[in-house]
Image (cartoon, grey):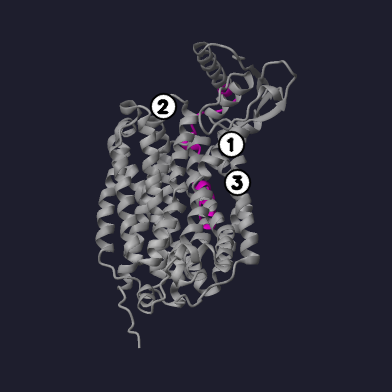
Amino acid sequence: MTEEPVRSPMGLVLAASSAGTVFEWYDFFIFGSLAAIIAKHFFVGVGESQAYLFALLTFAFGFAARPFGALVFGRIGDAMGRKRAFLVTITVRGLATFAVALLPDFAATGIAAPIALVAIRVLQGFAIGGEYGGAAIYVAEHASANRRGWATGWIQASAGLGLVLALVVILGVRTLLGEDQFGAWGWRIPFGVSVALLAISLWIRLRLDESPMFRLMLEEGRVSKAPLTETFLHAGNLKTMSIALVGVLMGQGVVWYTAQFYTQFFLERVIKLDPPVVNELVMIVTLASLPLYMFFAWLSDSIGRKPVMLFGLGIAAIGFIPGFQMLTQAANPALADAVASSPVVVIAPPDNCSLQFDLIGKANYVTSCDIAKSTLAGIGIPYTNARGPSGRRTLVQIGGNALEAPETTGAPPLALEKAKKDFSTKLKATLAKAGYRFAAATQRIDFARTILLLMIFIVAATALYGPQAAALVELFPTRIRYTALSVPYHIGVGWFGGFLPATAFAIVAATGNIYAGLWYPVIVAALGFVVTLFLLPETRRRDISV
């Protein structure tokens, strides 16, 4: 008779798994929160709006590498053990995060600086590809069947704790040094602090035993010899992975990143709240959200995983666009009033306009239409488009006033820059007369309503995310669980969620509509709702030992 494998104490299991998750999200939150500052240091000479987009893309590149890390570390976890993969992923990721604190910027090394930054983000993403799956599996394989959702809910809540920790460190350093010193060099400190988190996480994980289910499988000779082949060439496993990807993981990625990251971008970059105010709002909402992860995870143990996750997807699909419109009214009523009373309309012949979607920074905006739109996008002013007569310069209509944009096709570089600068100055003055403000008045923010709206977005994210770890573990057999869970998770969350800030920002810049970027998460969430409702099986209390 096979002896029962030794189990690590459940408290130690939760601490080890949660510490790694806190560390993981601490890193990504500090990079996301400091994207505007990082853009100024590493992406120089391409304009403020383009530099910010490059910073968001660098943030996203880390997510692009995740599925490839999932393949490598998934195989290690399935063939050699959960603990070994655990230790490697956290070490590589931790050292890469710390390296950002020491990385010279563009002023010191030129083009090598952004290249090195992208390389570090890719290395971090590659390592994280094996982190989440390992944490979820390790906890679930220790937990009892009737409390599996609650146990894995600690991992989900740790993501919010990572954000809180990141914001606490950022606000503390910002307050201590002042905005100028923080922007100059103090932003590096939060990355440097990560080395302490690495040391704590490693110390805890070194005390762990191997997962009892993996040890039993090893003793019985059931370990997969080729987990990648078994995962991707078995029709049943591939079908389950596809349903999980489209039904839950793509939706979770876009919903969670909209609630946690795009709200921050929207408040700071679009409706012009001061960054410290945005940090404080996000921290308040994130602290309030921590019990929600545990609540929805616990609820899924009682009523099932599907209804809870469907609730989150439904709120997102229905509520994001009207919710963000109300958020503008609550957080910057002056902007909402100006848009209503003096809407901005760009009147131009279609052949004079380019698509304002410049992911590589090589677009040459020289026509009057392009100059008008790129200037408005750069200062975060929403606009609509109207067809103008062919052969005429573009007009920017602001309420009852109109301003003609310069035509600089064929102009030398110095003349082009002067024309753009002069137009920007005149445009800002005209907008100011119409009631537009380029910084939100803190005293006019309806904080109660703003926090309530942010909490609605967070409820959608936590309802979807809370039960997710348990649901994913229960979908796949033990012998290929690490690979089969990790790959779709990091495609859905990493690619669809990680690229959301950059994609939504580019859509806003291309259309002039500050809410247009929200169609991306809304459509993905609606698709996920349909697939989850009709195709995803209910897995609560399923036997996961086989």
| Residue position for label 1 | 508
Stretch in magenta:
431-460
Q: Are marks 1 and 3 in contact (CB under 8 Å)?
A: no
Q: Estimate how packed mark 2 is, as few (under 14), some (14 to 19) or many (20 or more) residues with alpha carbons within 10 Å.
A: some
> Disc 2 marks which amino acid?
Val
Residue in front for this viewpoint, 344 or 226:
226
Q: Earlier in the sequence, mark 1 or mark 3?
A: 1
> Disc 1 marks which amino acid?
Val
Determine the CA span between mark 1 and mark 2: 22 Å
The total of numbered circles placed on residues is 3
| Residue position for label 3 | 520
Residue in front for this viewpoint, 501 or 278:
501
Determine the CA span between mark 1 and mark 3: 11 Å
| Residue position for label 2 | 44
Q: Residue at x 38, y 64 (%)?
A: 77
Direction from residue 127 to residue 102 in the image, left or right = left
